[in-house]
Amino acid sequence: MVFARKEHEFLSEIGLSSRNLGCYVDGTWKANGPVVTSVNPANNQAIADVVEGSIEDYEEGMRACSEAAKIWMQVPAPKRGEIVRQIGDALRTKLQQLGRLVSLEMGKILPEGIGEVQEIIDMCDFSVGLSRQLNGSVIPSERPNHAMLEMWNPLGIVGVITAFNFPCAVVGWNACIALVCGNCVVWKGAPTTPLITIAMTRVVTGVLEKNNLPPAIFTSFCGGADIGQAVAKDTRISLVSFTGSSKVGQMVQQIVNQRFGKCLLELSGNNAIIVMDDADILLAVRSVMFAAVGTAGQRCTTCRRLLLHESIYQRVLDQLLDVYKQIKIGDPLGKGTLLGPLHTSESRKSFERGIEIIKSQGGKILTGGSVIESEGNFVQPTIVEISPNADVVKQELFAPVLYVMKFQNLQEAIEINNSVPQGLSSSIFTRKPEVIFKWIGPQGSDCGIVNVNIPTNGAEIAIHETLNLYDQLWERVTTGTRNQFWVDTHQGSRAVPLPFGSAITFACLKCSSRAMVKRPSCLRTALAFLWINDFHRQPTIKTEAIKE
Protein backbone atom coordinates (compact mmCIF):
# COMPACT_ATOMS: atom_id res chain seq x y z
CA MET A 1 0.00 0.00 0.00
CA VAL A 2 1.37 3.41 -0.96
CA PHE A 3 2.11 6.20 1.50
CA ALA A 4 0.06 9.39 1.50
CA ARG A 5 3.16 11.60 1.57
CA LYS A 6 6.10 11.31 -0.81
CA GLU A 7 8.65 11.89 1.97
CA HIS A 8 7.50 8.65 3.61
CA GLU A 9 8.17 6.47 0.58
CA PHE A 10 11.63 5.49 1.86
CA LEU A 11 9.86 3.42 4.52
CA SER A 12 9.07 0.77 1.89
CA GLU A 13 12.81 0.06 1.76
CA ILE A 14 12.64 -1.28 5.33
CA GLY A 15 9.50 -3.34 4.86
CA LEU A 16 6.87 -0.83 5.95
CA SER A 17 3.63 0.17 4.22
CA SER A 18 0.77 2.53 4.96
CA ARG A 19 -0.92 -0.23 7.00
CA ASN A 20 1.13 -2.74 9.03
CA LEU A 21 0.50 -5.77 11.21
CA GLY A 22 2.23 -5.18 14.55
CA CYS A 23 3.10 -8.65 15.89
CA TYR A 24 5.77 -11.07 14.76
CA VAL A 25 4.54 -14.46 15.98
CA ASP A 26 6.34 -17.68 15.10
CA GLY A 27 7.54 -16.38 11.75
CA THR A 28 4.27 -14.68 10.75
CA TRP A 29 3.14 -11.07 10.86
CA LYS A 30 -0.31 -10.89 12.40
CA ALA A 31 -2.37 -8.78 14.79
CA ASN A 32 -5.93 -8.79 16.08
CA GLY A 33 -5.97 -5.72 18.30
CA PRO A 34 -6.93 -2.08 17.76
CA VAL A 35 -5.57 0.03 14.91
CA VAL A 36 -3.33 2.95 15.88
CA THR A 37 -1.81 5.67 13.73
CA SER A 38 1.84 6.59 14.02
CA VAL A 39 2.31 10.35 13.72
CA ASN A 40 5.23 12.64 12.97
CA PRO A 41 5.77 14.83 16.07
CA ALA A 42 7.12 17.64 13.87
CA ASN A 43 3.69 18.21 12.31
CA ASN A 44 1.35 15.68 13.98
CA GLN A 45 0.52 14.27 10.53
CA ALA A 46 -0.07 10.56 10.04
CA ILE A 47 2.81 8.38 8.86
CA ALA A 48 1.17 4.96 8.76
CA ASP A 49 -1.35 2.72 10.53
CA VAL A 50 -0.43 -0.24 12.72
CA VAL A 51 -2.67 -3.03 13.96
CA GLU A 52 -1.67 -3.77 17.54
CA GLY A 53 -1.53 -7.18 19.12
CA SER A 54 -4.16 -8.79 21.31
CA ILE A 55 -3.65 -10.99 24.36
CA GLU A 56 -4.46 -13.97 22.12
CA ASP A 57 -1.63 -12.93 19.79
CA TYR A 58 0.66 -12.64 22.79
CA GLU A 59 -0.16 -16.13 24.05
CA GLU A 60 0.41 -17.65 20.63
CA GLY A 61 3.76 -15.88 20.37
CA MET A 62 4.87 -16.97 23.82
CA ARG A 63 4.07 -20.62 23.15
CA ALA A 64 6.24 -20.54 20.05
CA CYS A 65 8.99 -18.62 21.83
CA SER A 66 9.08 -21.18 24.67
CA GLU A 67 9.62 -23.97 22.15
CA ALA A 68 12.28 -21.99 20.30
CA ALA A 69 14.14 -21.40 23.57
CA LYS A 70 14.76 -25.16 23.91
CA ILE A 71 16.63 -25.10 20.60
CA TRP A 72 18.43 -21.75 20.85
CA MET A 73 20.01 -22.42 24.25
CA GLN A 74 21.69 -25.52 22.81
CA VAL A 75 23.36 -23.63 19.97
CA PRO A 76 27.05 -23.07 20.90
CA ALA A 77 27.70 -19.55 22.15
CA PRO A 78 30.20 -18.63 19.37
CA LYS A 79 27.62 -19.66 16.76
CA ARG A 80 25.03 -17.52 18.53
CA GLY A 81 27.58 -14.74 18.30
CA GLU A 82 27.85 -15.31 14.55
CA ILE A 83 24.08 -14.75 14.23
CA VAL A 84 24.37 -11.49 16.15
CA ARG A 85 27.27 -10.47 13.89
CA GLN A 86 25.03 -10.99 10.89
CA ILE A 87 22.33 -8.89 12.55
CA GLY A 88 24.87 -6.08 12.88
CA ASP A 89 25.77 -6.39 9.20
CA ALA A 90 22.10 -6.36 8.22
CA LEU A 91 21.58 -3.20 10.23
CA ARG A 92 24.54 -1.58 8.47
CA THR A 93 22.82 -1.99 5.12
CA LYS A 94 19.72 -0.18 6.42
CA LEU A 95 21.46 2.33 8.70
CA GLN A 96 20.35 5.48 6.90
CA GLN A 97 16.74 4.37 6.42
CA LEU A 98 16.35 3.17 10.01
CA GLY A 99 18.00 6.30 11.36
CA ARG A 100 15.67 8.43 9.28
CA LEU A 101 12.69 6.50 10.62
CA VAL A 102 13.82 7.08 14.22
CA SER A 103 14.03 10.80 13.48
CA LEU A 104 10.67 10.83 11.70
CA GLU A 105 8.66 8.85 14.25
CA MET A 106 10.39 9.78 17.52
CA GLY A 107 11.37 13.37 16.71
CA LYS A 108 15.09 13.43 17.53
CA ILE A 109 17.36 15.12 15.00
CA LEU A 110 18.68 13.00 12.14
CA PRO A 111 22.29 12.62 13.36
CA GLU A 112 20.91 11.32 16.66
CA GLY A 113 18.55 8.95 14.87
CA ILE A 114 21.37 7.48 12.78
CA GLY A 115 23.59 7.39 15.87
CA GLU A 116 20.98 5.40 17.75
CA VAL A 117 20.93 2.67 15.12
CA GLN A 118 24.72 2.72 15.07
CA GLU A 119 24.64 1.99 18.80
CA ILE A 120 22.94 -1.33 18.07
CA ILE A 121 25.49 -2.15 15.38
CA ASP A 122 28.33 -1.48 17.80
CA MET A 123 26.54 -3.50 20.46
CA CYS A 124 26.39 -6.40 18.01
CA ASP A 125 30.16 -6.13 17.53
CA PHE A 126 30.70 -6.10 21.29
CA SER A 127 28.41 -9.10 21.83
CA VAL A 128 30.20 -11.15 19.18
CA GLY A 129 33.34 -10.92 21.30
CA LEU A 130 31.36 -11.68 24.43
CA SER A 131 30.07 -14.91 22.86
CA ARG A 132 33.57 -16.38 23.20
CA GLN A 133 34.06 -15.15 26.77
CA LEU A 134 31.16 -16.73 28.65
CA ASN A 135 33.60 -18.88 30.55
CA GLY A 136 33.35 -19.96 34.18
CA SER A 137 35.90 -20.61 36.90
CA VAL A 138 37.52 -23.74 38.28
CA ILE A 139 37.35 -23.34 42.06
CA PRO A 140 39.58 -25.24 44.51
CA SER A 141 37.65 -27.68 46.67
CA GLU A 142 38.26 -28.49 50.36
CA ARG A 143 37.72 -32.16 49.59
CA PRO A 144 40.59 -34.17 48.12
CA ASN A 145 40.35 -35.18 44.46
CA HIS A 146 37.42 -32.83 43.87
CA ALA A 147 36.97 -29.64 41.88
CA MET A 148 34.14 -27.15 41.64
CA LEU A 149 33.16 -25.78 38.23
CA GLU A 150 31.32 -22.55 37.59
CA MET A 151 29.07 -22.81 34.53
CA TRP A 152 26.82 -20.12 33.04
CA ASN A 153 23.50 -21.26 31.60
CA PRO A 154 20.83 -19.28 29.74
CA LEU A 155 17.75 -18.07 31.57
CA GLY A 156 15.48 -19.03 28.68
CA ILE A 157 13.42 -16.00 27.65
CA VAL A 158 14.20 -12.33 28.28
CA GLY A 159 11.42 -9.77 28.00
CA VAL A 160 12.30 -6.24 26.87
CA ILE A 161 9.90 -3.31 27.30
CA THR A 162 11.24 -0.14 25.70
CA ALA A 163 10.38 3.57 25.79
CA PHE A 164 9.84 6.11 23.03
CA ASN A 165 12.98 8.19 23.61
CA PHE A 166 15.38 5.42 22.53
CA PRO A 167 12.94 3.23 20.63
CA CYS A 168 15.50 0.85 19.13
CA ALA A 169 18.84 1.35 20.93
CA VAL A 170 17.53 -0.05 24.22
CA VAL A 171 16.31 -3.29 22.66
CA GLY A 172 19.74 -3.54 21.01
CA TRP A 173 21.58 -3.23 24.31
CA ASN A 174 19.39 -5.94 25.81
CA ALA A 175 18.77 -8.28 22.90
CA CYS A 176 22.35 -8.55 21.64
CA ILE A 177 23.60 -9.75 25.01
CA ALA A 178 20.53 -11.89 25.68
CA LEU A 179 20.91 -13.67 22.34
CA VAL A 180 24.60 -14.50 22.67
CA CYS A 181 23.89 -15.76 26.19
CA GLY A 182 21.41 -18.24 24.74
CA ASN A 183 18.14 -16.51 25.53
CA CYS A 184 15.17 -15.84 23.30
CA VAL A 185 13.85 -12.29 23.27
CA VAL A 186 10.28 -11.02 23.58
CA TRP A 187 10.11 -7.32 22.76
CA LYS A 188 7.24 -5.01 23.54
CA GLY A 189 8.04 -1.71 21.82
CA ALA A 190 6.81 1.74 22.81
CA PRO A 191 3.17 2.26 21.74
CA THR A 192 3.98 5.59 20.06
CA THR A 193 6.86 4.24 17.95
CA PRO A 194 5.36 1.06 16.43
CA LEU A 195 6.96 1.52 13.01
CA ILE A 196 10.43 1.35 14.55
CA THR A 197 9.45 -1.85 16.37
CA ILE A 198 8.28 -3.44 13.12
CA ALA A 199 11.25 -2.30 11.02
CA MET A 200 13.82 -3.45 13.58
CA THR A 201 12.08 -6.81 13.96
CA ARG A 202 12.17 -7.33 10.19
CA VAL A 203 15.93 -6.87 10.14
CA VAL A 204 16.58 -9.25 13.06
CA THR A 205 14.19 -11.97 11.97
CA GLY A 206 15.45 -11.78 8.40
CA VAL A 207 18.80 -13.03 9.70
CA LEU A 208 17.12 -15.85 11.67
CA GLU A 209 15.19 -16.97 8.59
CA LYS A 210 18.31 -16.85 6.44
CA ASN A 211 20.04 -19.22 8.87
CA ASN A 212 17.06 -21.61 9.13
CA LEU A 213 16.63 -20.91 12.82
CA PRO A 214 13.28 -20.86 14.64
CA PRO A 215 11.79 -17.43 13.94
CA ALA A 216 10.28 -17.26 17.43
CA ILE A 217 13.78 -16.75 18.88
CA PHE A 218 12.94 -13.07 18.43
CA THR A 219 9.27 -12.28 19.03
CA SER A 220 7.86 -8.75 19.06
CA PHE A 221 4.59 -7.02 19.83
CA CYS A 222 3.18 -3.58 19.19
CA GLY A 223 0.61 -2.85 21.83
CA GLY A 224 -0.43 -1.00 24.94
CA ALA A 225 -0.34 -1.56 28.67
CA ASP A 226 -2.13 -4.94 28.44
CA ILE A 227 0.81 -6.46 26.56
CA GLY A 228 3.30 -4.89 28.97
CA GLN A 229 1.42 -6.30 31.95
CA ALA A 230 1.34 -9.72 30.33
CA VAL A 231 5.13 -9.63 29.92
CA ALA A 232 5.62 -8.62 33.56
CA LYS A 233 3.29 -11.35 34.87
CA ASP A 234 4.48 -14.16 32.59
CA THR A 235 6.40 -16.82 34.54
CA ARG A 236 7.86 -18.09 31.27
CA ILE A 237 9.90 -14.87 31.07
CA SER A 238 12.77 -15.20 33.52
CA LEU A 239 14.03 -11.64 33.23
CA VAL A 240 12.16 -8.45 32.34
CA SER A 241 14.12 -5.39 31.23
CA PHE A 242 12.06 -2.21 31.49
CA THR A 243 12.94 1.32 30.42
CA GLY A 244 10.56 4.14 31.28
CA SER A 245 9.19 6.21 34.13
CA SER A 246 9.86 5.46 37.79
CA LYS A 247 6.14 5.12 38.45
CA VAL A 248 5.60 2.39 35.85
CA GLY A 249 8.98 0.82 36.59
CA GLN A 250 8.02 0.37 40.22
CA MET A 251 4.81 -1.37 39.15
CA VAL A 252 6.74 -3.67 36.81
CA GLN A 253 9.25 -4.51 39.51
CA GLN A 254 6.54 -5.38 42.03
CA ILE A 255 4.76 -7.65 39.57
CA VAL A 256 7.96 -9.43 38.53
CA ASN A 257 9.14 -9.75 42.14
CA GLN A 258 5.85 -11.36 43.16
CA ARG A 259 6.70 -14.27 40.89
CA PHE A 260 10.39 -14.22 41.93
CA GLY A 261 11.52 -13.12 38.49
CA LYS A 262 14.50 -10.93 37.67
CA CYS A 263 14.33 -7.27 36.70
CA LEU A 264 16.57 -4.78 34.91
CA LEU A 265 15.27 -1.23 35.26
CA GLU A 266 16.40 2.04 33.70
CA LEU A 267 14.12 4.73 35.04
CA SER A 268 14.01 8.47 35.66
CA GLY A 269 16.99 10.80 35.83
CA ASN A 270 17.32 14.26 37.39
CA ASN A 271 20.91 14.80 36.43
CA ALA A 272 23.11 17.64 37.61
CA ILE A 273 26.26 19.28 36.26
CA ILE A 274 28.44 21.08 38.81
CA VAL A 275 30.78 23.82 37.58
CA MET A 276 33.51 24.69 40.07
CA ASP A 277 35.29 28.04 40.25
CA ASP A 278 38.43 26.61 38.61
CA ALA A 279 36.58 24.97 35.71
CA ASP A 280 37.21 25.51 32.01
CA ILE A 281 34.20 27.74 31.37
CA LEU A 282 34.10 27.29 27.60
CA LEU A 283 34.21 23.53 27.98
CA ALA A 284 31.50 23.58 30.63
CA VAL A 285 29.09 25.78 28.68
CA ARG A 286 29.41 23.69 25.53
CA SER A 287 28.82 20.51 27.49
CA VAL A 288 25.79 21.90 29.31
CA MET A 289 24.22 23.03 26.05
CA PHE A 290 24.49 19.56 24.52
CA ALA A 291 23.41 17.76 27.71
CA ALA A 292 20.36 19.97 28.31
CA VAL A 293 19.10 20.54 24.76
CA GLY A 294 19.92 17.27 22.98
CA THR A 295 16.93 15.03 22.15
CA ALA A 296 14.76 17.97 23.26
CA GLY A 297 15.52 17.14 26.88
CA GLN A 298 13.99 13.68 26.56
CA ARG A 299 16.98 11.56 27.49
CA CYS A 300 17.09 9.76 30.82
CA THR A 301 20.54 11.33 31.17
CA THR A 302 19.55 14.88 30.13
CA CYS A 303 21.11 17.58 32.31
CA ARG A 304 18.20 19.11 34.23
CA ARG A 305 20.08 20.92 37.02
CA LEU A 306 23.08 23.22 36.60
CA LEU A 307 24.98 24.07 39.78
CA LEU A 308 27.33 27.04 39.40
CA HIS A 309 29.90 28.29 41.90
CA GLU A 310 28.85 31.76 43.03
CA SER A 311 32.10 33.37 41.83
CA ILE A 312 31.51 32.34 38.19
CA TYR A 313 27.72 32.18 38.22
CA GLN A 314 26.94 35.19 36.06
CA ARG A 315 29.81 34.57 33.65
CA VAL A 316 28.68 31.04 32.85
CA LEU A 317 25.03 32.03 32.73
CA ASP A 318 25.61 34.90 30.30
CA GLN A 319 27.50 32.65 27.88
CA LEU A 320 24.85 29.95 28.10
CA LEU A 321 22.04 32.42 27.42
CA ASP A 322 23.84 33.74 24.34
CA VAL A 323 24.13 30.24 22.91
CA TYR A 324 20.55 29.23 23.75
CA LYS A 325 19.19 32.16 21.76
CA GLN A 326 20.87 30.88 18.58
CA ILE A 327 19.83 27.23 18.73
CA LYS A 328 18.12 26.22 15.49
CA ILE A 329 14.70 24.71 16.19
CA GLY A 330 12.78 22.90 13.48
CA ASP A 331 12.25 19.78 11.42
CA PRO A 332 14.44 17.06 12.94
CA LEU A 333 15.18 15.81 9.42
CA GLY A 334 16.32 19.27 8.35
CA LYS A 335 19.97 20.19 7.91
CA GLY A 336 21.49 22.00 10.87
CA THR A 337 18.54 21.50 13.23
CA LEU A 338 19.65 21.15 16.85
CA LEU A 339 16.30 20.98 18.61
CA GLY A 340 13.39 18.95 17.30
CA PRO A 341 9.90 18.59 18.76
CA LEU A 342 8.75 16.89 21.91
CA HIS A 343 7.46 13.42 21.14
CA THR A 344 3.73 13.93 21.64
CA SER A 345 1.19 16.70 21.99
CA GLU A 346 0.68 15.52 25.57
CA SER A 347 4.39 16.14 26.21
CA ARG A 348 3.87 19.68 24.95
CA LYS A 349 0.99 20.15 27.40
CA SER A 350 3.14 18.70 30.18
CA PHE A 351 5.79 21.30 29.37
CA GLU A 352 3.22 24.09 29.70
CA ARG A 353 1.98 22.71 33.02
CA GLY A 354 5.55 22.38 34.23
CA ILE A 355 6.35 26.01 33.41
CA GLU A 356 3.32 27.19 35.38
CA ILE A 357 4.38 25.11 38.39
CA ILE A 358 7.92 26.48 38.11
CA LYS A 359 6.63 30.05 38.19
CA SER A 360 4.34 29.31 41.14
CA GLN A 361 7.34 28.04 43.13
CA GLY A 362 9.47 31.10 42.57
CA GLY A 363 11.28 30.10 39.39
CA LYS A 364 12.47 32.94 37.16
CA ILE A 365 12.39 32.22 33.42
CA LEU A 366 15.65 33.57 31.97
CA THR A 367 15.03 32.40 28.41
CA GLY A 368 12.39 30.29 26.68
CA GLY A 369 9.46 29.06 28.72
CA SER A 370 6.88 28.96 25.95
CA VAL A 371 5.52 26.58 23.36
CA ILE A 372 6.12 27.45 19.72
CA GLU A 373 2.93 27.90 17.77
CA SER A 374 3.07 25.37 14.97
CA GLU A 375 1.55 22.11 13.79
CA GLY A 376 4.20 20.20 15.71
CA ASN A 377 5.11 19.73 19.36
CA PHE A 378 7.84 22.36 19.50
CA VAL A 379 8.83 24.22 22.66
CA GLN A 380 11.52 26.75 23.45
CA PRO A 381 14.70 25.57 25.18
CA THR A 382 14.34 27.02 28.65
CA ILE A 383 16.64 28.17 31.44
CA VAL A 384 15.17 28.77 34.90
CA GLU A 385 16.76 30.41 37.93
CA ILE A 386 15.35 28.67 40.97
CA SER A 387 16.08 27.51 44.52
CA PRO A 388 17.38 23.93 44.86
CA ASN A 389 14.77 23.43 47.59
CA ALA A 390 11.79 24.00 45.28
CA ASP A 391 9.64 20.89 45.03
CA VAL A 392 9.54 21.07 41.24
CA VAL A 393 13.33 20.67 41.10
CA LYS A 394 12.98 17.25 42.72
CA GLN A 395 10.82 16.03 39.85
CA GLU A 396 11.70 15.05 36.29
CA LEU A 397 10.19 17.30 33.63
CA PHE A 398 10.86 15.47 30.36
CA ALA A 399 11.58 18.56 28.27
CA PRO A 400 14.45 20.98 27.51
CA VAL A 401 14.16 22.83 30.83
CA LEU A 402 17.37 23.58 32.75
CA TYR A 403 17.31 24.69 36.40
CA VAL A 404 20.21 26.96 37.37
CA MET A 405 21.32 27.50 40.97
CA LYS A 406 24.29 28.78 42.99
CA PHE A 407 26.51 27.10 45.54
CA GLN A 408 29.36 28.31 47.76
CA ASN A 409 31.56 25.24 48.17
CA LEU A 410 32.00 21.65 47.00
CA GLN A 411 30.20 20.10 49.95
CA GLU A 412 27.10 22.20 49.31
CA ALA A 413 27.18 21.26 45.62
CA ILE A 414 27.39 17.55 46.41
CA GLU A 415 24.49 17.86 48.85
CA ILE A 416 22.36 19.56 46.20
CA ASN A 417 23.32 16.91 43.64
CA ASN A 418 22.27 14.14 46.02
CA SER A 419 19.09 15.85 47.25
CA VAL A 420 16.76 14.43 44.57
CA PRO A 421 15.23 10.93 44.62
CA GLN A 422 16.49 10.08 41.12
CA GLY A 423 20.12 9.00 40.81
CA LEU A 424 21.20 8.19 37.26
CA SER A 425 23.97 10.46 36.01
CA SER A 426 26.03 13.42 37.22
CA SER A 427 29.08 15.45 36.24
CA ILE A 428 31.51 17.98 37.66
CA PHE A 429 33.79 20.45 35.87
CA THR A 430 37.04 21.14 37.67
CA ARG A 431 40.81 20.98 37.28
CA LYS A 432 41.59 19.99 40.87
CA PRO A 433 42.46 16.33 41.57
CA GLU A 434 41.32 16.57 45.18
CA VAL A 435 37.88 17.73 44.04
CA ILE A 436 37.68 14.92 41.49
CA PHE A 437 38.47 12.21 44.00
CA LYS A 438 36.05 13.65 46.53
CA TRP A 439 33.37 13.69 43.80
CA ILE A 440 33.85 10.06 42.76
CA GLY A 441 34.37 8.76 46.29
CA PRO A 442 31.91 7.43 48.89
CA GLN A 443 31.02 10.94 50.05
CA GLY A 444 30.60 12.32 46.53
CA SER A 445 27.92 11.82 43.91
CA ASP A 446 25.35 9.13 44.71
CA CYS A 447 24.56 8.52 41.03
CA GLY A 448 25.25 5.38 39.01
CA ILE A 449 27.23 7.33 36.40
CA VAL A 450 29.76 9.84 37.72
CA ASN A 451 31.52 12.02 35.15
CA VAL A 452 34.24 14.63 35.22
CA ASN A 453 34.54 17.35 32.56
CA ILE A 454 32.01 15.78 30.18
CA PRO A 455 28.19 16.00 29.90
CA THR A 456 25.79 13.81 31.86
CA ASN A 457 24.76 11.91 28.74
CA GLY A 458 25.32 8.19 28.69
CA ALA A 459 28.30 8.53 26.33
CA GLU A 460 26.36 7.32 23.32
CA ILE A 461 28.22 5.61 20.53
CA ALA A 462 28.45 7.39 17.17
CA ILE A 463 27.27 10.66 18.67
CA HIS A 464 30.11 12.72 17.24
CA GLU A 465 27.95 13.69 14.23
CA THR A 466 25.45 15.32 16.56
CA LEU A 467 28.16 17.06 18.53
CA ASN A 468 29.65 18.45 15.36
CA LEU A 469 26.41 20.39 14.88
CA TYR A 470 26.67 21.81 18.38
CA ASP A 471 30.32 22.59 17.76
CA GLN A 472 29.44 24.57 14.62
CA LEU A 473 26.97 26.64 16.61
CA TRP A 474 29.56 27.20 19.30
CA GLU A 475 32.15 28.42 16.84
CA ARG A 476 29.66 30.98 15.55
CA VAL A 477 29.21 32.57 18.96
CA THR A 478 32.65 32.20 20.56
CA THR A 479 36.31 32.46 19.66
CA GLY A 480 37.46 29.70 22.00
CA THR A 481 40.00 27.11 20.94
CA ARG A 482 38.71 23.81 19.66
CA ASN A 483 40.04 20.67 21.31
CA GLN A 484 38.82 17.12 21.33
CA PHE A 485 38.46 14.45 23.93
CA TRP A 486 37.76 10.78 23.78
CA VAL A 487 34.91 9.36 25.76
CA ASP A 488 34.14 5.79 26.75
CA THR A 489 31.05 4.07 25.37
CA HIS A 490 28.30 2.19 27.19
CA GLN A 491 30.02 -1.02 26.19
CA GLY A 492 33.47 0.05 27.31
CA SER A 493 34.93 -1.58 24.20
CA ARG A 494 35.88 1.42 22.11
CA ALA A 495 36.10 5.19 22.13
CA VAL A 496 34.83 7.92 19.83
CA PRO A 497 36.18 11.44 19.33
CA LEU A 498 34.00 14.30 20.57
CA PRO A 499 34.62 18.02 20.09
CA PHE A 500 34.90 19.36 23.62
CA GLY A 501 38.21 19.23 25.57
CA SER A 502 40.21 17.08 27.95
CA ALA A 503 38.16 14.78 30.12
CA ILE A 504 38.15 12.31 32.94
CA THR A 505 35.28 9.85 33.11
CA PHE A 506 34.44 7.58 36.00
CA ALA A 507 31.56 5.18 35.66
CA CYS A 508 30.40 2.25 37.71
CA LEU A 509 28.29 -0.14 35.65
CA LYS A 510 26.89 -3.61 36.19
CA CYS A 511 27.69 -6.06 33.44
CA SER A 512 24.42 -6.89 31.69
CA SER A 513 25.76 -10.17 30.36
CA ARG A 514 25.88 -11.67 33.85
CA ALA A 515 22.29 -10.63 34.44
CA MET A 516 21.21 -12.69 31.44
CA VAL A 517 22.30 -16.04 32.87
CA LYS A 518 21.35 -18.18 35.83
CA ARG A 519 23.54 -16.72 38.52
CA PRO A 520 22.59 -14.12 41.14
CA SER A 521 26.03 -12.56 41.23
CA CYS A 522 27.21 -10.18 38.55
CA LEU A 523 30.43 -8.59 37.47
CA ARG A 524 30.90 -5.09 38.80
CA THR A 525 33.12 -3.08 36.52
CA ALA A 526 34.71 0.18 37.54
CA LEU A 527 35.89 2.17 34.55
CA ALA A 528 38.32 5.02 34.87
CA PHE A 529 39.49 6.97 31.83
CA LEU A 530 41.97 9.83 31.81
CA TRP A 531 43.22 11.77 28.82
CA ILE A 532 45.21 14.97 28.54
CA ASN A 533 45.43 17.55 25.78
CA ASP A 534 48.52 16.06 24.22
CA PHE A 535 47.44 14.33 21.04
CA HIS A 536 50.98 13.33 20.11
CA ARG A 537 50.66 10.49 22.61
CA GLN A 538 48.16 7.67 22.83
CA PRO A 539 45.60 8.01 25.64
CA THR A 540 46.10 5.91 28.74
CA ILE A 541 43.19 3.66 29.67
CA LYS A 542 42.84 1.92 33.01
CA THR A 543 40.11 -0.63 33.60
CA GLU A 544 39.53 -2.44 36.84
CA ALA A 545 37.04 -5.25 37.33
CA ILE A 546 35.86 -6.26 40.79
CA LYS A 547 33.84 -9.42 41.35
CA GLU A 548 30.96 -8.81 43.75
Image: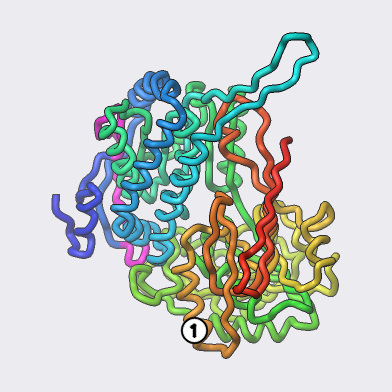
Q: Is residue 33 magenta?
A: yes
Residue at left offset 80%, top offset 83% = 311
Residue 136 seen in render: yes
Q: Residue 291 versus residue 518: which sits nearer the camera?
A: 518
Q: Which residues are magenta?
A: 22-44
Residue 194 seen in render: no
Image location of residue 502, percent across then percent down: 65, 72
Identify residue type, mark 1. Gln
Q: Residue 119 versus residue 168: which sits nearer the camera?
A: 119
Image location of residue 176, percent across then percent down: 45, 40
Residue lying furthest bottom: 479
Residue at left offset 37%, top offset 22% = 68
Left or right: 534 in relation to 353:
right
Occupied quadrant, residue 390? bottom right
Above or below, 119 relative to 304: above
- Give the colour scheme of this rendering: rainbow
Task: Kindly identify which residue carries mark 1.
Answer: 326
Q: Quadrant of the C terminus?
A: top right
Q: Residue 248 versus residue 481: which sits nearer the camera?
A: 481
Above or below, 361 relative to 424: below
Q: Residue 150 versus residue 107: which sits nearer the camera?
A: 150
Image location of residue 320, percent across then percent down: 61, 81
Above or below, 477 relative to 484: below
Residue at left offset 51%, top offset 78% = 471
Left or right: 485 in relation to 112:
right
SS class of the residue under badge 1?
Answer: loop
